[in-house]
Every structure is written in structure tokens, then in C-alpha cells.
Amino acid sequence: MQVVISADYEEMSKAAAGVMAKVVRDKPTAVLGLATGSTPLGMYKELIRLHREEGLDFSGVTTFNLDEYVGLDGSHEQSYRYFMTENLFKDINVNIDSTNVPPGISDDFKASCAAYEEKIRDAGGIDVQVLGIGSDGHIAFNEPSSSLASRTRLKTLTQQTIDDNARFFETPEDVPVYCVTMGVGTILEAKKLILLASGAGKADAVADAVEGPVSSMCTASALQLHPDSIICLDTAAMGKLQMREYYQWVQDKRPGAPRWD
């Protein structure tokens, strides 16, 4: 696990975008795992800039998103398909048919979730997966107590997650209670993981994920088990890390070296 410390949100976003851009340049047919929420917006903005100004080519990539709300189709403004279209897909040259978001509407969720897993396998697996972290330490919608071996499935959201996400809806009652999410086991099969966290409100969750025990009560802690995981933080999000001076020391002792190799 590599902890990358940035001065602020903008620097953190550019660092994460640099990881993604390198993967795409090295492998034009890369499979990208994407996340929604406010934290990756800066990274997506930088990827759009790299596409427009530096020719970063997404025409050969395939994408898979982590999760989707149950009951919302892709035209709903709070669906994650809509989020991805508005914040990334429409501004880069990705083939929209090569973009995948878990099904929010299905007559048979068990079958559609299994099909999503199979589609990831058929694509050759995910080369780099972007993650955010919830205030309770969850990744994707793998709420506390989720199995660390879990696969794509239906999940019931906790009240805390519903409350955290209520700001995106007109009323708290509009927040869906159910979702479809990649499982922790699915996420850990990606070749590289990048977790983004910004702000003091995420500091406790980050500390539990990076330095706490590996536990289903903080599903982000499973990244400790991955051979190539990168934790991109701004200074506020790193505030509760006991080893923060060491992480900064490691970073400072590698002049000229990429922070994400």
C-alpha cells in the first residue's frame, strides 16, 4: 500500500489522473474501473483536460462502474450512469457501448449481477480501479459487515450512507434504500487500486482503512491485502494517520520518482 500525500484536492486529483493516464497510454485497450461521488470529479476534470489538450485517447478503453441505485434508470439525474455521462463520458472519445454500469433495474438481479461479473472477466479483468471511501469506511456500496469475498450483488444501504447521500436528492426520502454494487472480492481482483479521499471528514475512515485491522466493518481496509494499492490523500484527509510523517518522509526521499509507481 502506497500513501500519496497532496497539498490539496486539486493536486490530489491531478496525481490520480496521472495514474489513470499512464495506464491508458501504456495500454490503449485498458479496462478502467470508475467511481462516482464528489471526490473523483477533479480527477475526471483533469482526464478531460488531458484528452482535449494532450490527446489522451480513450477510444479503445472499456469501463466498469462500481455501483448503481436500484430503481433508477440511466436517464435519472441521480443515477450513476447519468453521473458518468455528464462528468466524463460526453467529454472524452470513449465508445459509449464500451462503458458499463451495474443494472439499477432488472427482473432478475441475481442473474444480471452474475452477468456483470462475467462481462468483467470476458474483458480480461480491470486494470485500474478507482475508489472513494465512505465516512464509515465503505468502498463502493460495501457497507460495514460486508464480506471481504463478496461479489456484485444487491445491497441494502445503511442509514448513515443514506444520510450522507441525501444532499444529492431533493429530500432524504428520495434516496434509494437498495443498490447494486461490485463486491470487495471483485474489487480486489483489479490489477491496481486507487483510493481517493479528501477533507477532514474522511480522516477517521482513512486511518481505519490504512492503519487499522483488516475488517469487514471497514471494507476499505481490504486494500491492505492488495499488492498494488495507492491511497491518494490531501493533507486534511491524512490528519488521523499515526504514520503520516513516515509517509511524507518516504515521498520526500524519492525525488523525481513517480508517486504512484
Image (spheres, helix red, strand yellow):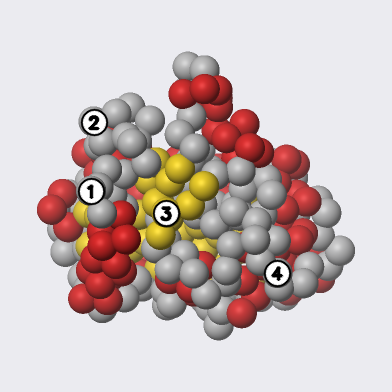
What label sits on residue 107 in the rendered view?
1
Which residue is located at x 75 percent, y 49 percent?
203
Tell me the quarter of the picture where residue 113 sits. Answer: bottom left
* Residue 236 position within the rendered picture, expressed as x and y whole percent measured from the top left: 74, 45
Mark-to-mark CA distance, 4 and 2: 36 Å
What label sits on residue 154 in the rendered view?
3
Q: Residues within 10 Å of mark 4 (few under 14, many from 20)?
A: some
Tell me the quarter of the picture where residue 176 sits. Answer: top left
Disc 4 versus disc 3: nearer the observer: 3
Residue labelled with disc 2: 75
What label sits on residue 215 in the rendered view?
4
Whether residue 96 is situated above or below residue 75 in the rendered picture: below
Disc 2 versus disc 1: nearer the observer: 1
Is residue 97 left or right of 37 when viewed as pictured? left
Mark closer to the chain start, 4 or 3? 3
* Residue 114 position within the rendered picture, expressed as x and y whole percent measured from the top left: 29, 67
Mark closer to the chain start, 4 or 2? 2
